[in-house]
Image (cartoon, helix red, strand yellow):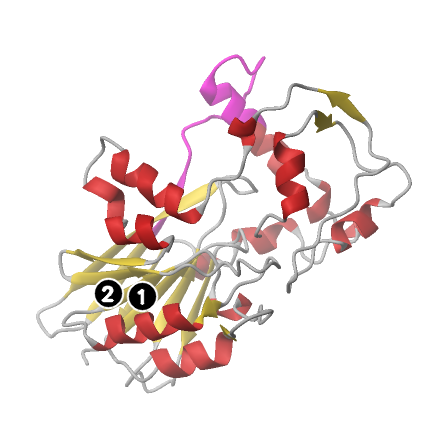
Amino acid sequence: MAPSEEFINEMVGPRRYTALPTTTPLFEVLMQFREVGPASYPSADDAPYVSVAEDLERRAIERGEYAQMHLNSPGTPRGHGFTEENAKNKTMYYTTNLQGVKLIVIDSVNHFGGWQGSLDLEQFEWLEKEVAAADRPVVLASHHPLSKMFNDYAPVGRRVCLAEIQTMLLKYPQVIAWLAGHEHRHHIEWIGPQEEVTGFWQIETASHADWPQQSRTVEIVTDAAGDIYFGLTVVDHAAGVDYAKAQNPLEIAALSRAISANVWQKRPELGAKHGIDWWLGRPTDRNVVLKINKR
């Protein structure tokens, strides 16, 4: 979600809030964060706080600055996909070739506000050009999955959303997968016609912040007949079950996992939309082999 000017001022200002507003029920506080823009945040007028020193280093990092940090990093490859053009133009989308696959990373955040996704028109047109020019299979990656690309709020210009994005991608048989997060769950879905002339696998993976605190490896291979296979493996972090006194990183990670399994948002009696198993997904959403026939 894009930060508002008021929110940025709070980030660097002299207050650290210690609890939610005292006169607003929790459910109402959460409902003040809008799926679709403009940006909206709960009022903190009556929230308890302690005084802290103002610090501009707590400000939000801008798009171009974030790209430049990757370019300045001593790690390899330089930029990790970001280019000097990203830093100059303050864009967060790029392409890179990974052996036999073209990876296209898109920026699905609507900077006008709202926590669901969409694309600006310039990025959408860039995306189609990159897909059309690909001489190898294409894999997309973004924060939002396709189903959550409906944040059409735009005080200037227009945003490109779910139906238009899907229609465009299904014109190109070289698109084979879309990797995403956002929902903090394991979920795999086929997008496209059943005859597989075009279409792709959408592969969503859970979060390290929420239960089950897992990541995923994606292996892509081609057999002698030209069929494409995805080997998907869910990976737990290295922490055990016992968090003892949480005195080292692994114990803290174990405590974090325990807390993530007990958060109120996953309790049906407290109004949760989904039970805890929803985030785990089905067995076929986790460790599985997927196939796309030769095109």
Tell me the tag on residue 25.
Answer: none
Mark 1 or mark 2, which has the lower sequence index? 2
The amino acid pointed to by label 2 is: Tyr
In the rendered image, residue 215, in percent from the top left (x then y), is placed at 41, 44
Q: Which quadrant of the figure contains the C terminus?
A: bottom left
Instruction: Report if residue 239 lies within the magenta region.
Output: yes
* Label 2 environment density (alpha carbons within 10 Å; few <14, some 14–19, many ≥20): some
Q: Which residues are magenta?
A: 233-255
As helix, strand or loop, the secondary structure at mark 1 comes to strand
Horizontal relation, residue 56 to residue 88: left or right: right
In the displayed structure, 235 sits above or below 166; it is: above
- Tell me if residue 252 can be seen: yes
The amino acid pointed to by label 1 is: Leu
In the rendered image, residue 254, in percent from the top left (x then y), is placed at 53, 26
As helix, strand or loop, the secondary structure at mark 2 comes to strand
- Tell me if residue 292 can be seen: no
Q: Quadrant of residue 239?
A: top left
In the displayed structure, 271 sits above or below 128; it is: above
In depth, the one of 167 and 73 nearer the eye is 73
Asked if marks 1 and 2 touch (Cβ < 8 Å), the reply is yes
Q: Quadrant of residue 26?
A: top right
Disc 1 target residue: 290
Name the residue: 28% across, 70% down.
Answer: 291
Name the residue: 23% across, 33% down.
Answer: 75
| Disc 1/disc 2 C-alpha distance (Å) | 6 Å
In depth, the one of 227 and 35 nearer the eye is 35
In depth, the one of 258 and 141 nearer the eye is 141
In depth, the one of 136 and 124 nearer the eye is 124
Tell me the tag on residue 229.
Answer: 2
Horizontal relation, residue 23 to residue 267: left or right: right
In the rendered image, residue 118, in percent from the top left (x then y), is placed at 50, 67
Name the residue: 20% across, 41% down.
Answer: 78
